[in-house]
Image (cartoon, helix red, strand yellow):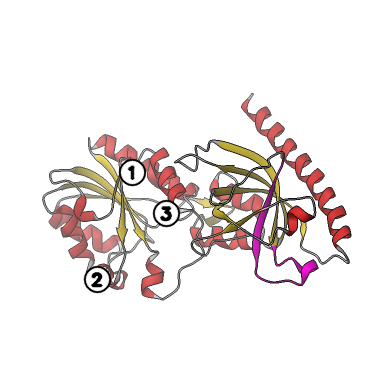
Amino acid sequence: MRILSSIDELPAGLRFVLTLGIFDGVHRGHLRALARTVAAAGKHRAESVVITFEPHPSKVLRGIAPAALTDPAERLSRLARAGIGTTVVQRFDADFAAQSAERFLRRLTNSRDLAAMLMTAESAFGHDREGTLSEVRRLSGTLGFAVIELPQLASAGAPISSSRLRAVIELGQLAQARRLLGRDYAVIGEVVRGDRRGRQLGYPTANLRFEQAVALPPNGIYAVRLSWGGRDPLVPSRRAPGVASLGIRPTFGGGERVLEAHLFDVDEDLYGERLRVEFVRRQRGEKRFSSAAALTRQMDRDAVRARELLAARASSRSERLC
């Protein structure tokens, strides 16, 4: 997949089919839209193009962005896996936000051949979100491209959306998140130095720092799958099962909310690595223990339970593949 940093970098003479959006989460609804984009590009003998934005437009327009559902590198990898030929990661700033929908479309079609654009009835772009489906249909007649309307994909009677996915994750509904995503929810963070208390208790952990606010489930203990290494987060060089703690560590007085993971059967320096943590199952909530020894006994039980849960999940996945 070709990655560009501005719509103005799209080559002159390019014939393309376009869809645009944040694609945060790259959930099942996004995947269907991407598949339709690739199919339409094939029909029109054109390049499939996605335009996404960085930072999140809400950061520029409202001063705050929603918690991220997908690491930027993973988002690009998933777009490539969906078959998209070119992704434009457009810098979203005040000047870009101020342009009209018509100006945006004219920039796209200047010296290029936009064959078709895919939108849902809820889509909108441009200044004051004036680029609605009906407005784009009107402009398409002048600018000479087709408009393909995509119905929103639903699950359990409600549309699949990033805001819905964010809500179910933050409520701890990991099974529901899995249905919306088509996979287990995961986050990626940089391993940083902590207070090394886990090592003192016999459970060394990798403490994660995030470049931006990410959607996280409720505090507690989780069975997780971990991966790291390699240029593509979806093609890691290393993998390991593990157990993760998310919370404020109340046994030691509380503090900043931290995600820390203990990797089973791995003892190596991971500082500086980008570690992907895939949440498989919540085992229990966070609680305060009377002593470090009591906490260690519970951690022993948590580790045994995590291994059981991960083995059961691996077995069920193998059975489905048979």
Q: Residue at x 74, y 36 (%)?
A: 311
The foreground one among 248 and 37 is: 248
**Is residue 21 left or right of 184 when viewed as pictured?**
left
Question: Would you name the residue on which mark 2 appears?
Answer: 95
Q: Secondary structure at mark 2?
A: helix
Question: Would you name the residue on which mark 1 appears?
Answer: 37
Residue 119 on image: x %, y %: 33, 54
Between discs 2 and 3, the one toward the N terminus = 3
Q: Amino acid at mark 2?
A: Asp
Task: Kindly check if marks 1 and 2 are in contact, taking CB atoms under 8 A apart as contact.
Answer: no
**Is residue 240 left or right of 49 when viewed as pictured?**
right
Q: Which residues are magenta?
A: 247-264
Q: Please say if 234 is above or below 203.
A: above
Judge whether residue 283 can be spotted in this image: no
The foreground one among 145 and 31 is: 31
Q: Residue at x 13, y 46 (%)?
A: 12
Give the total number of marks visible in the rendering: 3
- Mark linked to residue 23: 3
**Is residue 316 left or right of 33 when viewed as pictured?**
right
**Label 3 to label 1, Cα distance in Å?**
14 Å
Q: Secondary structure at mark 3?
A: loop
Q: Is residue 241 magenta?
A: no
Q: Amino acid at mark 3?
A: Phe
Q: Residues within 10 Å of mark 2 (few under 14, many from 20)?
A: few
Between discs 1 and 2, the one toward the N terminus = 1
Judge whether residue 60 can be spotted in this image: yes
The foreground one among 135 and 94 is: 94
Quadrant showing the C terminus: top right
Q: Which quadrant of the view contains residue 78?
A: top left
**Label 2 to label 3, Cα distance in Å?**
22 Å
Q: Residues within 10 Å of mark 3 (few under 14, many from 20)?
A: many
